[in-house]
């Protein structure tokens, strides 16, 4: 179950490409983003995908909150200190304090292109970006990420796992605030 919870976090950092132009791969740095998601987790052992729905909110200074509302409510927070999950008492419990992993996710989500190019091989096609992780630590969980764009905004994220499982994340009602560096 913990792996299913961490996969959405990896997906969220991909939001960094919300303002990407596939022909030039230019990114605007995003200081804040929010919207809704529908996530379909396709496991080889299940005939139907496991579907979750909820919303997300990213703020450059505070990190990323991924709030799953259906079918089970959970809230995960990613900051430079690590990944934590909200407990029934309202406090957050640390799932991982790997700041390198968290900083990578936050860099991806914010659109920091230099960091993205260091961490991924990037292939471009019309309305599609494919990210192939360079780090073995990441390829143990995700072997490839595909971003499907419309009007330079991400509409769908597909995460491919080593075992053949994959996750589709559909993003809607996305609002963002961009800043120029």
Image (cartoon, rainbow, N blue to C red):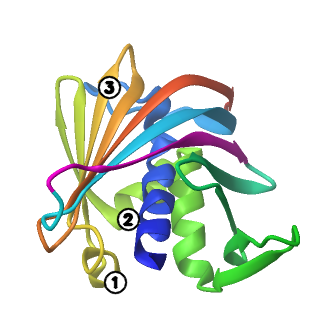
Lower sequence index among marks 3 and 2 = 2
Alpha carbon distance from label 1 to label 3: 27 Å
- Give the secondary structure at mark 2: helix
Query: Cβ–Cβ below 8 Å for labels 1 and 3?
Result: no
Query: Is 12 situated above or below 128?
Result: below
Residue 35, above or below 39: above
Q: Which residue is mark 3?
A: 149
**Residue, disc 1:** 137
Magenta residues?
47-59
Q: State which mark lies toward you, 3 or 2.
A: 3
Q: Position of residue 45 (x, y in %)?
A: 15, 68
Question: Does 61 sit left or right of 8 as displayed?
Answer: right
Q: Is residue 181 visible?
A: no
Crowding at dot 1, Cα within 10 Å, few <14 / some 14-19 / many 20+, comes out as few
Q: Is 38 colored magenta in this rendering?
A: no
Residue 90 is situated, as x and y percent measured from the top left of the image, at: 87, 67
In the rendered image, which residue does mark 2 sit on?
118
């Amino acid at each position: 179950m913990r792996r299913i919870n961490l996969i959405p976090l990896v997906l969220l950092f991909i939001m960094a490409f919300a303002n990407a132009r596939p022909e030039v791969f230019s990114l605007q740095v995003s200081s804040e983003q929010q919207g809704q998601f529908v996530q379909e987790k396709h496991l080889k052992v299940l005939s139907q995908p496991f579907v979750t729905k909820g919303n997300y909110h990213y703020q450059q200074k505070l990190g990323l909150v991924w709030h799953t509302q259906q079918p089970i409510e959970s809230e995960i927070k990613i900051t430079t200190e690590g990944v934590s999950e909200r407990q029934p008492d309202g406090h957050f419990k640390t799932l991982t304090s790997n700041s390198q992993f968290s900083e990578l996710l936050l860099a991806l989500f914010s659109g920091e292109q230099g960091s993205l190019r260091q961490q991924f091989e990037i292939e471009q096609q019309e309305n599609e970006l494919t990210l192939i992780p360079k780090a073995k630590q990441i390829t143990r969980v995700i072997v490839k990420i595909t971003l499907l764009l419309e009007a330079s905004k991400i509409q769908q994220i597909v995460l491919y796992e080593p075992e053949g499982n994959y996750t589709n994340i559909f993003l809607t009602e996305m609002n963002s605030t961009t800043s120029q560096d």
